[in-house]
Image (cartoon, grey):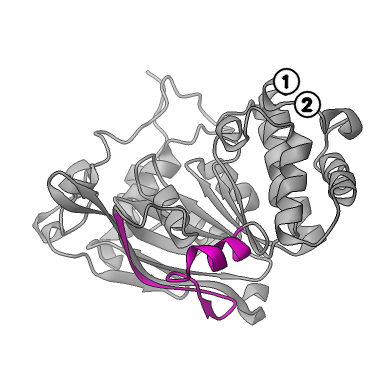
Amino acid sequence: MEQKTKPILLDVDGLSVSFATDRGMVRAVRDVSFRVHEGEILSIVGESGSGKSVTLLSLLGLHDRKTTKVDGAVSFRGRHILDLPAGRMRAIRGKEIALISQDPMTALTPVYTIGWQIAEQIRAHEPVSARVARRRAVELLGEVGLSNPGEAVDRYPHQLSGGMRQRAVIAMALSCNPALLVADEPTTALDVTVQAQVLDLLLRLRKDFGSAIILITHDMGVVAEVADRVAVMYAGRIVERGRTEEVFASPIHPYTWGLMASIPPLSGVRLQRLRSISGMPPTPETIAEGCGFAPRCAYARAACAQRPPLRRAGEHSALCVIDDGERQSLRRTALAVEEPA
């Protein structure tokens, strides 16, 4: 409940993103709204293609304005940033809002050392000398856990392991002490041990620097470990949102049930096969006006062809036609552990 009293850092209201194609404009993100308070961790979770990365890259201005149409309102610290000129947006991006890319190998320029790239970002936003910036780069590499930062600062990206590159990208994102850190699936390409280290690092950074974090992921286990609030996204819409403990204790949307049922159980009977959601996510041009999940939903009905109503329980809400009366029994069936054959 502490987050309620903290100021709103980022306010996204009715964000929609459309791309120009040979068949006209195709809408990939539809009427997305959420808020992030200071010091809060919001996780946006969903399968690949659900619109998570497009949403965050668009509100950061990292889209081609010639081929992309972005509607809605985005406020950061009370300033509307969606229509800012590119120069003013660059002054915010990197300094006040930082991005940890999904793939550190493509986020880093291969022909420059990681120390040079971190120092370049520092000097782009702060009036310091090259010597001071390099010294700060070494300190940052040490803070994110590289064992020999004085040596690593002069290495090229290909000379580092995947975990070390990810730490270098995190160091770059933290170089100007941003108020908001956007982490786009920062643990996807890492082994389990390094994943745990990166998550611990993000939590420590929130504690030490007070930064808010938007964590994009498809891993419900990661969400349960680090997030204060969660937004479940499917087919370009947020279909469920709420406090993490509420969403995990009593999920409302069948898509959330499917995500949670796919998590391997830590105790009880051993499953012969992991459960999965049948079918494939829709492409943006095939998303129906009603519930986008209906073609894959075992509980779909005729009413799903229309825009689903908002079911609300305090701060917890979801877009679904299933009412409170039948939800509990259907959820119990969807999340039931199957006995081994």
Q: Residues within 10 Å of mark 1 (few under 14, many from 20)?
A: few
Left-right relation of 74 to 24? right
Identify the disc placed on residue 159: 1
Compared with 48, 16 (above or below) is below
**Residue type marked 2:** Arg
Give the Cα separation between the discs numbered 1 and 2: 6 Å
Compared with 69, 11 (above or below) is below
Question: Where the N terminus falls, by quadrant?
Answer: bottom right
**Front residue of 220 and 265:** 220
Is label 1 in contact with label 2 (beta carbons under 8 Å)? yes
- As drawn, which residue projects farthest toward the left? 302
Q: Residue at x 59, y 33 (%)?
A: 266
Q: What is the tally of numbered marks visible in this picture?
A: 2
Left-right relation of 307 to 70? left
75 is within the stretch colored magenta: yes
Left-right relation of 152 to 255? right
Residue 167 in the image, given as x and y percentages of width and height: 72, 37
- SS at badge 2: loop
Q: Residue at x 76, y 53 (%)?
A: 122
Q: Residue at x 70, y 23 (%)?
A: 161
**Residue type marked 1:** Gln
- Residue at the disc numbered 2: 155
